[in-house]
Structure formats: structure tokens, C-alpha cells
Image (cartoon, rainbow, N blue to C red):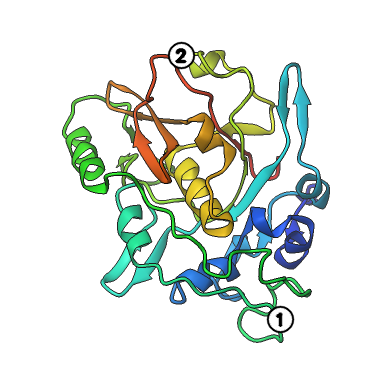
Amino acid sequence: MGGIPEPTTTISRASELVPPDRFFGPEQWLQYFPTTPGLTPETLGDAATIPWAEETLSAPCVKARDVRLADHFLFLGVSAVVLPVGRRSISLFAWPEILDSIRPRPPSSRPASGGLLGPFRRQRTVEPLALHAEPAVPSIRDPNRLRTWLRADWATPGPRGWSRPIGAPLVHFSVEPCAFRWHLIPIEVLDGSAGVYDLSQVHQPMEYQFATAIEVVTAALLYHLLNGRYPAMADQVARSSSWANGTGAICAWADQGELAIGLRPSAEPPGVVLSRTPFG
């Protein structure tokens, strides 16, 4: 006998439930990277459906004790894109090069008429001003210095910067690709988590886990592509669950229009970012 089916939502239905400024799916990826692999209806696999119920997507507000999570950003994580110079993983190390390659394509102001992307498009007119006609491409602050620091961390003794995905070898956080699945992330840091050094002492609702560095950075950059600004968590300084070897948690924050990535910019630990557990 089979178990109870997990709650899921189709991509087309999710695009109706989630406001367009907080939804980044296959159509949006292909708008910027037309040759992104794995985004046809036939090759999406498990990502062809979104692992949350309609009720979660339409009102994902959770309140537990003093924790409140309201507005969320829903995006499809892809592990790689194809640039003119070749295939690049979606990772902290590669994001600066990926952003440099973007040639903005204005979103269509007409409803879909079928074709390759037809199953994903929202079947209603999107006003040209609802999303930026010429999106402002985000940038990462001082990418050369960032890469130098990341390379140095590879060579630094210590286990914290490395992880071992199930069935895979050790991988450093800076080159860990974004997981090819849907991600649902609050656009603000978790209330009450600032100033808490040990994440095991941070209470989060059971439906959530701590977001990794690649999740936080990818969410902030994709959100900026849609809205021309970073989400609130970047203004607040967003702490991830990823650690550099022996030094501290990886954070991201907005700095004069750019996204800075590194260790916390203040003595006190910033607020932490959460990610909704699939089917949670």
C-alpha cells in the first residue's frame, strides 16, 4: 500500500499564487540564460512540480513562539548555466562571471501562446512595469578579492568549510552548486536570531532549515534581477549556515548597490536566513 501523497503544486499554478516579483522559475532562467540545461518540461524531473501545497505558497506565514515568517521568495535553483565561454556551476565562486554574461531580455507584455515555455507561463498579461523592462543586473562587490579569499580558504586546515552531500565527495562551500530543486526562502532574516553565535541555540519552526550560503546569495541575486533591489535580508545582513574554515559564518549584505559576500561585517552575529524544507 502506498503512503499519503506529498503535497505539490504545478509551476503554472504557483506562478498565479506567488506575486511575480517573488517568483523565479524556468521561464525567468531562460530569459537570461536561453541555453540553461534541464529546463524543458521533459527534463525537469522532480522539479516539474513544486514541493509545497497551494496553501503554503499562497500564505506561507508561520508563527511559533516569537518567530514570524511572512513574505517568501520562490525560486528554482539550477546547478549550472551555459555561457559563451562554456558551462559554469551556480556557485559563489562562479556567480561574478555569470552576472557579467547577462544580456537583459525585457519580459513579454503579452500572454503566452504555447511553445517550449508554454506550460510554465502565467496565462495573463504582465504589465511592462510590473517587472523591470530592462532589469538592473546585480553585481558582487570586489569579485577578484572574493575569489582570492575563497581560494585561500580551500587551503586553510579545518573541516567547517567542507560538506559531503549524500553519495558525493567532499565539496567546499564556495564551489558547491545550487541544488536543482525549488527553494522557498523568507525575504527577511529570522526574528530573534541576531546576536546568537551558536545556531543550535536558534529556534526555527520545524518546517524550516538554515539556508546555505549558495541559497542566500542566489536568492538575493535573482530577487534583484526581478526587482532592481536586494531583498530585505540583504539590507539586514543575512547569515547562512555555511562556514569558512575556522573563521565564521558566511554572510551576504547590500553595500552601495552591490552584494558583499564574506564574514560578518560587525562584531555581533547577524540574523540567520531560513529555507523551507521540501514538502514541509
Residue 23 in percent (x, y) is at: 65, 57
Q: Nearer the viewer, residue 187 or 161?
A: 187
Q: Is residue 42 left or right of residue 176?
A: right
Q: Secondary structure at mark 2?
A: loop
**138 vs 244: above or below:** below
Q: Quick check: can you spot residue 142?
A: yes
Residue at 81% from the left image edge and 52% from the top image edge: 54
Query: For residue 197, which numbered disc appears in the image?
Result: 2
Q: Quadrant of the C terminus?
A: top right
Q: Residue at x 58, y 70 (%)?
A: 133
Disc 1 crowd, CA 10 A, few/some/many (<14, 14-19, 20+): few
- Between 40 and 253, the residue placed more toward the observer is 253
**Residue 211 image position (x, y, % from top left):** 52, 36
Identify the amino acid type marked 2. Tyr
| Residue 24 placement, left or right of 14 | left
* Residue 15 picture quarter: bottom right
Q: Nearer the viewer, residue 57 or 79?
A: 57
In percent of width and height, residue 61 lies at 77, 36
The amino acid marked with disc number 1 is Arg
Q: Residue at x 64, y 22 (%)?
A: 191
Residue 237 place in picture, x, y as percent:
48, 30
Relative to 221, does residue 209 appear above or below in the rendering?
Answer: above
Q: Mark 1 = which residue?
A: 110
Q: Secondary structure at mark 1?
A: loop
Q: Vertical placement of 182 versus 206: above or below?
A: below
* Residue 163 in view in this figure: no
The CA span between labels 2 and 1 is: 49 Å
* Residue 130, quarter of picture: bottom right
